[in-house]
Image (spheres, helix red, strand yellow):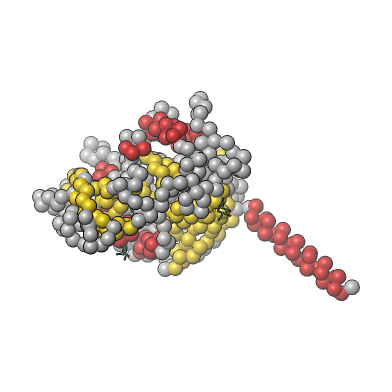
Amino acid sequence: MGQLLSATLVMLLVFVANNGMQQTEAQGVTRPYVRPPARKNLELEFSLWQTSTSSATSPTQMHVSLAGPNKMKVSWMTGSRTYNVPAIVRYGTAQGQLTQVATGTTKSYNYLLYQSGQMHHVILGPLADSTTYFYMCGGFGLVYNFTTPPPAGRDVPIKFAIVGDLGQTAWTESTLQHVAGYDYDVLLFAGDLSYADYFQQKWDSFGQMMSPYAHYRPWMVTEGNHEMEYIPLLAPSFRSYNTRWDMPYAESGSTSNLYYSFDVASAHVLMLGSYTNFGVGSQQYNWLLADLKKVDRSVTPWLVVVLHAPWYNSNSAHQGDGDQMMEVMEPILYQAKVDILFAGHVHAYERTTRAYQMNIDPCGMMHITVGDGGNHEGLASEWLYPQPEWSMMREASFGHGELDVKNATHAYWSWHRNNDNEAVKADDVWITSLSGPKSGCESSTEFIMN
Ligand SMILES: *[C@@H]1O[C@H](CO)[C@@H](O)[C@H](O)[C@H]1NC(C)=O
Ligand SMILES: *[C@@H]1O[C@H](CO)[C@@H](O)[C@H](O)[C@H]1NC(C)=O
Ligand SMILES: [Fe+2]
């Protein structure tokens, strides 16, 4: 009798506990995390009237990026414009045998009184997949190495690190160290890089700060509002960004460094531009349609978008900033059955369920905002209430994301908060691709135009 009673009691408890869990799963979570105080700004102090501070002829600000199938681009800066450092890279698969040589281009720019150093971009290849190459910029100096991504293939695993709004503070440093602790293949950057905000020397200090992290794995970036630096009559938009962070746009048929796409392993990644024309009939719009038509989900089952201003955002910061672009492009991306859209801009973390037109929809995209890289503007900690039903998890802390694609159907997403100097996994979810046979979501690239 007593046994029966306690068994019933246990069952009742389990029932109550399960119910409780289901409730927290069904409703979104807003995590209150009390942040430690702001950290030091690591930018150097500069004036608008100063000329270039880098005088070195030895390479600085190295970073590498994907540059088409089996190709990688090495980029670096040298200081002086009068002492010409050749845009050549010696490379090879063994440290002591840099037997191959590639040559590239050199660019520089003026911005008010600032004169940039020489930015060199050299494409290496064809390169083997998943292979470490050693390289020397300018043909002399230190030897660095990078590792190429995994081969193309529908079931090929790949690891992406995802960051946004980095800036250059002590929190940025923390985020970068945490990202470096993840053995990723490719980094995706959702815009707002240096927060130079017209002070061009801050692009140099940002380049220096990123170099230890960006010289050994490809970094793929798209622009944020802080990249514009437009001054009427005096400086066109994106002058510094385009010179320094030259992405492989022509390779995907784009005519602008502000939007492009690439294939890597089992993924097709669209890097869209929130701060250039995107309306119906614009160049970006037409390019997007053409690009999506070329996607073959049996070859690249994962379809991922990266842009700056989020479309699904329940933070009070930047409400509506992405609305116009969403209105034009969400129907197209929905038809194409995009899996995940990563955004930055809002300095917090938020993950949605799959959604379309502000409703939960199993065939819509999952939206993930990671504008929490650690810049000096601080966190966006005011949320809207009630939490929208599509918002699954939101937290105003600095951190970074990891997308671990396992095969054609499964990927594991996790977000890692900067708990002071420690990275703590604070959110995770399994994602199944909409290209899978069981998703029940058919993709179409016969776009219906209105
Ligand atoms: C490759 O580069 C990384 C990052 O700079 C470095 O930690 C590592 O030791 C290098 N590997 C070799 C074999 O030199
Ligand atoms: C894909 O990966 C998931 C997670 O690791 C696994 O459960 C599933 O069986 C894999 N699918 C195939 C076809 O291997
Ligand atoms: Fe922004």
Q: Residue furthest left?
A: 82
Residue displayed at 54% across by 57% down: 428
User: How many numbered marks appear?
Assistant: 0
Q: Residue furthest right?
A: 1
Q: Is residue 298 visible?
A: yes
Query: Closest to the observer: 50 or 57?
Result: 57
In the displayed structure, would residue 313 be above or below residue 375? above
Q: Locate residue 276, reporting x and y percent.
A: 36, 37
Left or right: 58 as drawn, with respect to 16:
left
Q: Where, by quadrant of the figure, is residue 46 drawn?
A: bottom left
Q: Locate residue 89, reporting x and y percent.
A: 21, 52
Query: Closest to the observer: 173 or 321?
Result: 173
Left or right: 303 as drawn, with respect to 132:
right
Left or right: 191 as drawn, with respect to 198:
right
Q: Is residue 51 visible?
A: no
Image quadrant occupied by the N terminus? bottom right
Q: Locate residue 98, reporting x and y percent.
A: 22, 57
Q: Locate residue 201, reporting x and y percent.
A: 23, 54
Residue displayed at 41% across by 27% down: 281
Residue displayed at 79% across by 64% down: 12
Residue displayed at 54% across by 36% down: 443
In the displayed structure, would residue 96 be above or below residue 188? below
In the displayed structure, would residue 171 be above or below residue 309? below
